[in-house]
Image (spheres, grey):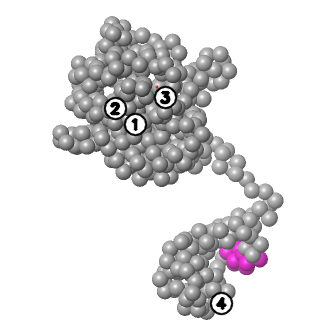
Amino acid sequence: MTDVTSRVASAAPRLVDRNTEFHRVVFAAAGDQHCSAGDATAPEISADRRSARCISVSRRIPDRTPCGDCLDRIARADAAERALVGRRIVRFMTGMDRPRRLRRTPAVRRLVAETTLRPRQLVLPMFVADGLEEPREISSMPGVMQHSIDSLRKSAVEAVTAGVGGLMLFGVPRPEDKDATGSKASDPDGILNRGLRALADEVGSSTVIMADTCLDEFTDHGHCGVLSADGAVDNDATLHRYVEMALAQADAGADLLGTSGMMDGQVGAIRRGLDAVGRTDTGILAYAAKYASAFYGPFREAVASSLEGDRRSYQQDPANRREAIRELDLDLAEGADIVMVKPAMSYLDILRDVADHSPVPVAAYQISGEYSMITAAAERGWIDRRGAILESLMGIRRAGADFVLTYWATEAAHWLS
Ligand code: PBG
């Protein structure tokens, strides 16, 4: 043993005995797994307690041999103990621990950064509007356009060249084309399907094309589904429309379908519908947790929404956290390939929960209101635009998103490459 290790080792029991933190470390290192040989002296205690006990017994009685399975865990616990105690001794000697050492230079900060933000982790939502000759700026989202088919193609090339991970397309039909069932949503010549075909043609081999699979832009009442006689959104009748819409979008070249309507059973219905016609390669990006949010305001202008009232009978109540896991479990059971949380910034706790539970990739949608807030504050000179954008995206990544849908995708991708 070197001087330092022997000093640490001899100091350890004294420090450790007073240290509950340490006991947690030992317990965590012991894990909750079964210690197969166990502790013969205590056959009555449960398996996971036995392995912790096995460790502590072997510590107290040096010549007692712990079971084979536990040797590993003991080694790990000892390493954790030494690290912890070592740091404490340094602090005792100097009176101070100095985390700033790892923040001192850009190089060391880069070396120890825990979270990455890369162009491929950004997805650009885009709007294509029927009957437009020129792109039209959305007034509540300065810098974001309703595209013509031509400008959609150009802007998609720009995004893909900048390195974004994918594109999510929304369609804006002419007002006179909206009806009660949103029939243009499943019409191959509807604006969204035409837009998808243009994207597939222009950039299809070099990116991931996603389609919004929801009726709200296409219905004259603006709801995400069809209505029953009493005016409520009819869940199961809506599922039939979603399947028709999904098939049209798959035909048009969408790789992933974004199920954003929050109807019960939508992922399963669409999965079955796709499989029945052999579209087993088309994936589902399920909006697992989608909350009824005031921050969708600017989007409603972006898609010229006809909605009166609200979506609280299908989108989730912002008060609920546990419910997000229920929605996640259902979407997974129904066949979701990727799950999403939306909005992002006011729901980072939900995103963390979902990321901790999900066996499939997790996305987050930084929505229109989040874009507009930062844009407006930056326009007034109240915050630094670039800094705020990158920090917001990093925060969403850190909370657990594998990728982020953001209206800044192209611009941020340029900054990041
Ligand atoms: C509804 C839909 C919404 C958004 C995308 N699709 C929300 C809504 O209108 O309730 C919001 C996107 C954004 O705000 O950026 N299908």
Question: Tag 3's secondary structure?
Answer: loop
> Circles 3 and 1: CB distance less than 8 Å?
no
Q: Which of marks 3 and 4 is in front?
A: 3
Label 1 secondary element? loop
Question: Residue at the location (19% across, 42% down)?
Answer: 276
Query: Which amino acid lies under the numbered mark 3 shown in the image of this protein?
Result: Arg
**Disc 2/disc 1 C-alpha distance (Å):** 8 Å
Q: What stretch is highlighted in magenta?
A: 3-15
What's the distance in space between the residues labelled 2 and 4, CA to CA?
69 Å
Q: Name the residue under label 3.
A: 311
- Residue at point 62%, 72% (across, down): 26
Name, please, the residue furthest toward the front: 230
Residue placed under numbered mark 4 in the picture: 61
Residue 10 in magenta? yes
**Amino acid type, callout 2:** Thr
Task: Give the alpha-carbon distance from disc 1 to disc 4, as whole Å.
Answer: 62 Å
Read off the residue under disc 1: 263
Residue linked to disc 2: 238
User: Picture coordinates of residue 18 (x, y %)?
Assistant: 77, 72
Upstream in sequence: badge 1 or badge 4? 4
